[in-house]
Image (cartoon, helix red, strand yellow):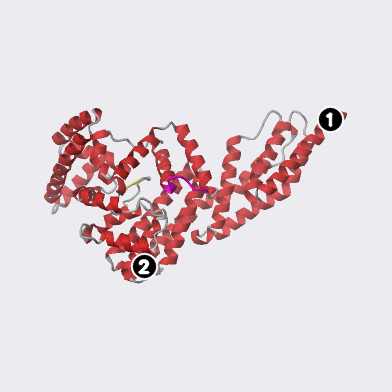
Amino acid sequence: MAAGGLLIERLRDYLRDLPAATRALLIAELERAALRGEEIPGGNFLLNEVRSAVRESDGTTPRLDGPARLVFRPLEPFLFDSNVVHKYPYRIARASLVPIWRWIGRDLMPEQAASFEREAGRALAAADPATCDHLTHLFHERLIERIRITFAAVASNEKARRRLAGQIGTVAPLEDIGDLLAIITRRDTFALIENRLPGHIPNLTPPLIDSVMALLESPFGVAHELLPYSLVLVLSQLAAPWQLIRLAVKAAGSDHDARVAGTPYATAVVHALGEIERQVAELKFDLRRGSAAACTVLLKSIHDAVRGLRTELDLAPDSTWGRQLAEIRADVSSLLKAEIESVPGRVRRLLRPRTARDTRGFVLDAGDIASTESLIELVGACRNYASELALNEIAQRTYHEVEQYLDTDKQALLEGLRKASDAERAFRQSQVDAAVRFCGKVFGQDYASILTKAAEVAAHSERKAAAKA
């Protein structure tokens, strides 16, 4: 395996072993930095890896032991992390590795798998990488042979194919094992290509396009039927994965989708669309866990990818790719609509006037304030990215409602703080503090600073009045 891949695996292990609270703090800091436009060490890769660790920490993704991870190491660039609902071509879900390994050890080659686990386990415990590599190479060769024999035996028997698929137990069993076979068979070639690719590609410019295509088409490159896998390797190095389509446009000498579809590089568009769909799956996950900050960062990435495809490809609305992109946009709009529409009501619930009896001994919940603040930020992001994500009307309307409410009700909050008794002062102050945070997201920090000073004056004037009395 390439040295870079080994470092990635070590980073991934480190992140997954962090305490849950530490992971949550890390991802929050990274997302805030991304929202501020700051440079993140490691770029989006690090942010994606931390998110993957958070998703796995929910307990739904089982972990592999050491020997199995040795076997699956060549698959690392081809794996994707998300809740598996369908198959992404030429890639394998990380969550599928455990059922695949169980199938290998239970049904495909139980004796060889058990022997490998014992011997490789001893080599790992002894920190003997040379022996680990040797044992893994031998196991790969046996695995390739057994898979080929097994597939050949069921090739003309549909009932046997269904039974085999049931034994494997992944979302797309036969396709997953076909990908596994192709990757393991050409693992050395793929490792060579991965090593010769730039480690990180911030922007796939014309000179880089030429050099990448020359690499993929060089004598040691793979055959055309395996080019889709090589394109996944390129995808994994791109800061903006959608830019993979530039290889296909270059190969076609045209941005017309029909011309692009006729080239060997057409799979680049398939990969780019699949990557957007994967990010939408992440968006669903982050919405469920209530992480509006993560959603805001993802939304920008999805927006940029959709805009990139719509700008650099001439997609006919009734073409396969055109319909797929339209479905993605509709899915994002549907996902975000309920979240966006809830924001004005959440703001009103927190800041609405209360009687003195309803405020004594209470303060606003810090979690409610933080989540509402993040949702306001999400609405602002939706408004900025509305044109590409079919959110124009609802985003603009919701943002205006929040603006209007904050602008017209701030005086009532200040007056409530000024007149507050000692028993209700803490609650009135918590309302004003929440309003300051919300105004900072809507009107900017200068406006929030002015409101903070006004609140200090209101609170101080009442204390002076009480002292005089």
Q: Main secondary structure of the magenta part?
A: loop
| Viewer-proximal residue among 113 and 234 | 234
Labels 1 & 2 near each other (Cβ < 8 A) = no
Q: Quadrant of the N terminus?
A: top left
Q: Which mark is residue 319?
A: 2
The residue segment tinted magenta is 38-44
Q: Residue 83, how many percent across, how many down?
A: 37, 45
Asked whether, in this view, residue 290 is left or right of residue 366, the answer is left
- Quarter of the image where one finds residue 47: top left
Whether residue 228 is in magenta: the answer is no
Looking at the image, residue 147 lies above or below residue 274: above
Please state the horizontal and vertical placement of residue 387, each as a whole percent of the image. Answer: 52, 61
Instruction: In this rendered view, identify the residue nearer to me: 360 or 237.
Output: 237
- Is any part of residue 356 visible from this angle? yes
* Residue 333 point in image, percent of width and height: 49, 56
Residue tagged by mark 1? 466
Depth check: give the residue in front, 293 or 324.
Answer: 293
Q: How many marks?
A: 2
* As drawn, 392 above or below 39: below
Provide the secondary structure element on which disc 2 rests. loop
Q: Is residue 342 visible?
A: no
Disc 1 secondary structure class: helix
